[in-house]
């Protein structure tokens, strides 16, 4: 037969009998099998390593967890030491970070996606935002030390830390905001503009509400990254041993709330962990493991929340 | 009733970057009549329709030359000094694929009033009801105005989009292949609707279906490769075309 001989280099490459075909399929299926095996092994290797780490951490740390551990300040006696100042610090800084980074990041993302002209300048900006997301976090610490601590004289405060981590996660929020906005089909924009809506009305009534699920996911993921950051906070001078809380934000007299806590010194959970790990006594290492468990659980909860929100919004938004 | 001009397209050239899409279209649009734009894919009929409400302004590199005069004030809606928002407030549009907002039925219909800053509740309620009635959707949705518009069927969604466009009483209603994504029953529904609506509003419709153009339109414009080949009363264009290209197209020899 002349079938398909024209295109192939040697006539023997063309199969004629059913047996040939079977042999050929077997050969190719073998490589399928090999790759599947290699993939599975790699996956198991990664998972088992991770699991060992987590189990080890949990076995050491979990027994140490108790109400006192959360309600005590650090102490030179390992059994009396707790993470009160650390988790309060982490919480206050997350709050400040979210407060700075969310409006900035979302606004920048919306601007880039909906307002900015698509030309080479916007492409350079886009490239640099992606680059910013990959810069080592300690670089942000150095920048913050020079700018916030020395130039703006904000001190080694919760505000400085919040701003620093805010800058650190800003690119993540911008990128996820843009992705969320890009997933809104143009037909929706056209529908809104065709009704005579302005750009801002289109953003306010459609773009922001429909992308809020994606934006929220990005925010949570960025905060779960910020909560584990240590290097930039050490650079700006976070304390490693702190036995008092920031000023209470509520007070008994007018105007009842204050923001003095923003200017207070702080420590955070990963720094507390680092501090305990650097001590020789093994009892402190147990404390560090317990703090690690707390951090891990918090990250897990935050990421879980992000996944839940994403799936919920996906179900709600049909185009 | 005497025939009156509602809009006039005068020597309209349109290009996307270097790509010329319309090469000088001149076309009247008569008040309270249905004007159909027909022609094979890529002839520029949708492009022409989207010029009427400056939809191209949403995308970069759109370039208009020539005029579309909106009567009776004879303003050139393609003029650089005219804000596209002004044009879109006067001319409504329904798209090829039903595109209701993922919000409630009520919010969808009231949207045009909302963006215009209309606050009066009773007025909005009245308008929502009237528009839904005009679009033949009222009886199906009156008990669930607050449920999501995306739960409606495709045909209902498209009628909702028509109601949404009607709520602000547009001077011209643009329909861009409004039934191409719908089943035959929904299509018939919408065609009947178009017949009803022409009493109240001037309609320009782009359609792929010659039968649909013959059924619903009073005037037909046949376009080919960015040129307007023939314009006339629909019965004349369909029974006795002047241009051989029109004849070839409507008899199915190409397209």
Image (cartoon, helix red, strand yellow):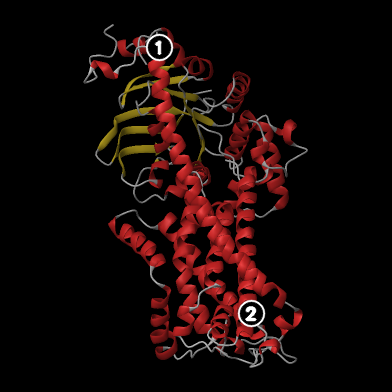
Q: Quadrant of the C terminus of chain A?
A: top right
Q: Which mark is residue A177?
A: none
Residue B46 picture quarter = top left
Residue where numbered disc 1 is placed: B250
Residue A199: image x %, image y %? 48, 54
Q: In the depicted view, which residue is nearer to us: A141 or A275?
A: A275
Q: In the depicted view, which residue is nearer to us: A238 or B24?
A: A238
Q: In the depicted view, which residue is nearer to us: B239 or A233?
A: A233
Label 2 in the same subunit as label 1 = no
Contact? badges 2 and 1 (CB < 8 Å): no
Q: How many marks?
A: 2
Residue A255 visible in the shown view: no
Above or below A148: residue A116: above
Q: Nearer the viewer's eye, disc 2 or disc 1?
A: 2
Q: Residue at x 38, y 46 (%)?
A: B59
Direction right: furthest residue: B143
- Label 1 crowd (10 A; few <14 / some 14-19 / many >=20): many
- Label 2 crowd (10 A; few <14 / some 14-19 / many >=20): many
Residue where numbered disc 2 is placed: A286
Above or below A4: residue B160: below
Q: Chain of mark 2?
A: A
Answer left or right for B223 relative to A173: left
Label 1 SS? helix
Whole-number angstrom distance, CA of label 2 to CA of label 1 = 85 Å
Residue B51: image x %, image y %? 39, 38
Residue A249 visible in the shown view: yes
Above or below A78: residue B136: above
Q: In the depicted view, which residue is nearer to us: A109 or B54?
A: A109
Residue B251: image x %, image y %? 40, 8
Q: Chain of mark 1?
A: B
Label 2 SS? helix
Answer left or right for B18 relative to B100: left
């Amino acid at each position: 037969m002349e079938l398909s001989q024209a295109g192939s280099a040697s006539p023997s490459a063309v199969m004629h009998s059913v047996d040939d075909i079977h042999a050929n399929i077997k050969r190719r299926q073998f490589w399928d099998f090999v790759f599947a095996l290699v993939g599975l092994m790699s996956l198991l290797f990664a998972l088992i390593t991770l699991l060992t780490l987590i189990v080890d951490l949990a076995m050491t740390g979990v027994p140490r967890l108790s109400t006192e551990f959360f309600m005590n300040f650090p102490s030179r006696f390992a059994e009396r030491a707790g993470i009160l100042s650390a988790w309060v610090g982490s919480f206050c800084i997350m709050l400040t970070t979210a407060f700075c980074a969310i409006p900035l990041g979302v606004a920048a993302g919306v601007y880039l996606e909906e307002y900015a002209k698509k030309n080479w300048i916007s492409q350079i900006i886009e490239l640099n935002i992606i680059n910013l997301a990959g810069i080592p976090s300690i670089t942000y610490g150095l920048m913050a030390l020079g700018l916030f601590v020395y130039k703006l004289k904000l001190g080694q405060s919760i505000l400085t830390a919040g701003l620093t981590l805010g800058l650190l996660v800003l690119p993540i929020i911008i990128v996820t905001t843009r992705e969320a906005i890009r997933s809104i089909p143009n037909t929706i924009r056209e529908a809104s503009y065709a009704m005579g809506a302005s750009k801002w009305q289109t953003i306010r009534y459609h773009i922001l509400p429909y992308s809020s699920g994606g934006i929220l996911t990005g925010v949570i993921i960025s905060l779960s990254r910020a909560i584990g950051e240590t290097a930039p906070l050490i650079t700006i001078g976070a304390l490693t041993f702190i036995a008092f809380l920031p000023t209470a934000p509520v007070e008994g007299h007018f105007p009842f709330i204050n923001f003095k806590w923003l200017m207070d010194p702080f420590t955070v959970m990963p720094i507390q962990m680092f501090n305990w790990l650097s001590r020789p006594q093994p009892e402190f290492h147990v404390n560090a493991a317990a703090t690690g468990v707390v951090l891990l659980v918090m990250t897990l909860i935050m990421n879980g929340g992000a996944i839940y929100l994403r799936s919920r919004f996906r179900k709600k938004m049909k185009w | 009733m005497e025939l009156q001009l509602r809009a006039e397209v005068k020597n309209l050239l349109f290009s996307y970057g270097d790509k010329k899409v319309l090469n000088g279209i001149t076309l009247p649009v008569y008040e309270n009549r249905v004007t159909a734009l027909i022609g094979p894919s890529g002839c520029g009929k949708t492009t022409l329709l989207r010029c009427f409400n400056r939809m191209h302004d949403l995308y970069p590199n759109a370039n208009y030359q020539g005029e579309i005069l909106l009567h009776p004030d004879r303003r050139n809606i393609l003029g650089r000094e005219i804000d596209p928002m002004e044009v879109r407030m006067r001319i409504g549009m329904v798209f090829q694929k039903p595109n209701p907002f993922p919000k409630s039925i009520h919010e969808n219909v009231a949207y045009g009033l909302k963006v215009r800053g209309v606050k009066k509740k009773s007025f909005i309620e009245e308008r929502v009801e009237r528009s839904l009635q005009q679009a033949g959707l009222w009886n199906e949705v009156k008990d669930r105005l607050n449920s999501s518009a995306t739960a409606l069927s495709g045909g209902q969604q498209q009628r909702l989009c028509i109601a949404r466009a009607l709520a602000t009483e547009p001077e011209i209603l643009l329909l861009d292949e409004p039934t191409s994504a719908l089943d035959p029953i929904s299509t018939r529904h919408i065609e009947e609707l178009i017949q009803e609506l022409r009493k109240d509003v001037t309609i320009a419709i782009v359609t792929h279906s010659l039968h649909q153009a013959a059924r619903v339109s009073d005037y037909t414009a046949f376009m080919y490769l960015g040129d307007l080949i023939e314009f006339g009363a629909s019965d004349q264009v369909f029974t006795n075309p002047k241009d051989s290209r029109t004849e070839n197209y409507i008899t199915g020899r190409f397209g």
